[in-house]
Image (cartoon, rainbow, N blue to C red):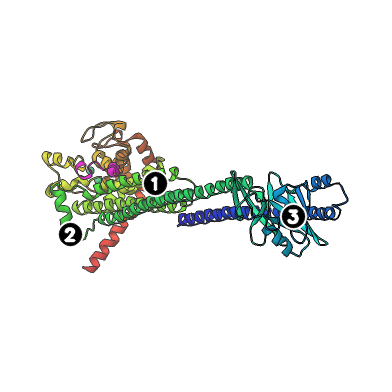
Amino acid sequence: MRYSELIKKHIKNSTIQNIIFLLIIFILWILFFLNINSNLKSISKINLNKFNDMMNNYYYHLKYISIINDEKLLEDINISKFYVIDEKGNIRKALPPIFDKENNISDTNFYYELTNNNSGIFIFKTNDEISRLYIGGKFNKTYLVGELEKINFGNDSNYFVAIKNKKNEIIYSKYNLKSISKILYLDGRLYINFPSKWNEITLYTFVDITNQLLYNLVISLIMLIIIIWNFVDRKKNLNFMNIFEMEFSKIIKSMENFLKELRILDKQSFLNVSERDFEDVIQPIKNEEFYFEELKELKEVEFYSVKEILELFDEISASTEELEATNKELEDLYLQIEKAYNDLEESYRKFSAHLSSIAEKYDEITGNHIERVAKYSKIIAKKMGYSAKFVSDIEAYAPLHDIGKLMIKHEILNKPGGLTRDEYEEMKKHTVLADKIFGDDERFKMAKNIAMYHHENYDGTGYPFRLKGEDIPIEARIVALADIYDALRSERPYKDEYTHEEAYNIIVKGDFKTKPSIFDPEVLEVFKKYHLEFDKIYTEYKKRERIEIEKFDKVD
Ligand SMILES: [Fe+2]
Ligand SMILES: [Fe+2]
């Protein structure tokens, strides 16, 4: 089925879309972190350089402390206090001049660590409650120590630095942090850090990622909404497809059932008239119990199927592109139904042929009469310019013109010689009796018209209703002439057979019994023009009959 392929394609498309969106989110975040990392690295490098410069500057001043202006030195490197300490921890000089308590700092860990460190430059933090930061260096046998007021390097709104010692203690930070983790949350902002080692001091550079993070979250959220929407949409489409598939298979199923039913009915509608069950068929007709149940059922089926087809077309127009893919299948189905209709039509024809043969067997005198009447009627209808359907219908139903005789007593029907007045009146009833046989079946309308009105005359002198002119259905007017021509040509219990010329003259000019005014003038015109074809048909049938009789005689 094509729609299952469509479903698969849809699932595949939306899955690929979702994967792409997820990849975009993933790449976005990777780029975001890579960008921050490279920023941090360069910021960190700048900060280290600044720190280095500061230290060199400090060295320089350390060397010249005793010879240059003290105040300027303090100002240049932002040192709040300055000490020159000897190897015993005694303060030898201080800037600005210090007070009592600060005369000796040899007890502090600061001094211990200062003296135990052999490298040129140090940054230390005191353990006292003031938590001051010192930077120091050894010069000859003295130590020059500066108490940092603040460190004057990189510190703006986006990033800042912190310093940790090798024991992992923070010895400098703007925010007095207790520890530094990879991502920090401070004052409603998010920071990410990058550590760089410089000697034994770790310098941390932080960058504020709040804005970038928000931006990324918004983009990711949009992508996620698209993904979710994609899933919902897919589910919706799948539901629609499932409903469509269900509905469609329901239609197919009912079509199949309908066709099956048609086939069964089609078989049933064939009256298998063998010699053996001929009596079975004729008996109910005689008892007027023949109601054409099968045909009624056929009509119901036909109505049902038309409704089905209309519904089917509604489905088609209501559906979208997906349905177009199934058009081919629908067309095939339609063709199948069309075929079933043709079969049905065919079975009506076959049925009427069987009915004709019943009539023929019942009425001993008719012989091939009804077949010839069919042929003449066909010629007239064709020459009058009727449609192919009309011509083929009249050919099929003309043989049923005397079907009402099935309900006329056998003795009257086949009585040799003439009939009494009452018997003739009884015989005339074969026209109206056709109504009982055909009922209201629309498909047998033409057959019924022929059987009911083939004895009506154009001038209003006929029976049973004395209809006049165009009140008589055209099919009956045609069959009337055909029937009379063949009756004239044939031998009947009450008359001899006439030649074609005699029959022609009686019809065209009239005699004691038949007048040209009883025929439809148009039908009569056609007969005048093509009468030789009538003769040809009659002669051919007669020839055939003779051959059959000869064969029959030889067998005897
Ligand atoms: Fe008749
Ligand atoms: Fe007839």
The x, y position of residue 540, in whole percent, is 34, 55
Q: Residue 508: say if magenta.
A: no
Q: Which residue is mark 3?
A: 135
Mark 3 and mark 1 lie on one chain; the one further toward the N terminus is 3
Q: Nearer the viewer, residue 307 or 382?
A: 307
Residue, x 45% and y 57% (percent of image)? 1
In the rendered image, is residue 511 in sight? yes
Amino acid type, mark 2:
Asp
Q: Secondary structure at mark 2?
A: loop
Magenta stretch prevailing secondary structure: helix
Position of residue 223 in the picture relative to residue 103 (left or right): left
User: N-terminal of the two: label 1 or label 2?
Assistant: 2
Residue 312 image label: 1
Amino acid type shown at disc 1: Leu
Determine which quarter of the picture holds residue 394. top left
* Gap in angstroms between the C-alphas marked 1 and 2: 43 Å
Residue type for callout 3: Ile
Locate the C terminus by quadrant. Answer: bottom left
Q: Residue at x 44, y 43 (%)?
A: 317
Instruction: Work out whether residue 330 or residue 505 is closer to the camera in this orientation and state it.
Output: 330
| Real-space Cα separation, disc 3 to disc 2, in angstroms | 131 Å
x and y percent of residue 176 in the render? 63, 49
Secondary element under disc 1, as helix, strand or loop, is helix
What's drawn in magenta, residue-wise?
435-446
User: x, y percentage for residue 85?
Assistant: 77, 57
Q: Which label was assigned to residue 377?
A: none
Residue that sits furthest to the right in the current view: 67
Of tags 3 and 2, the one toward the viewer is: 3
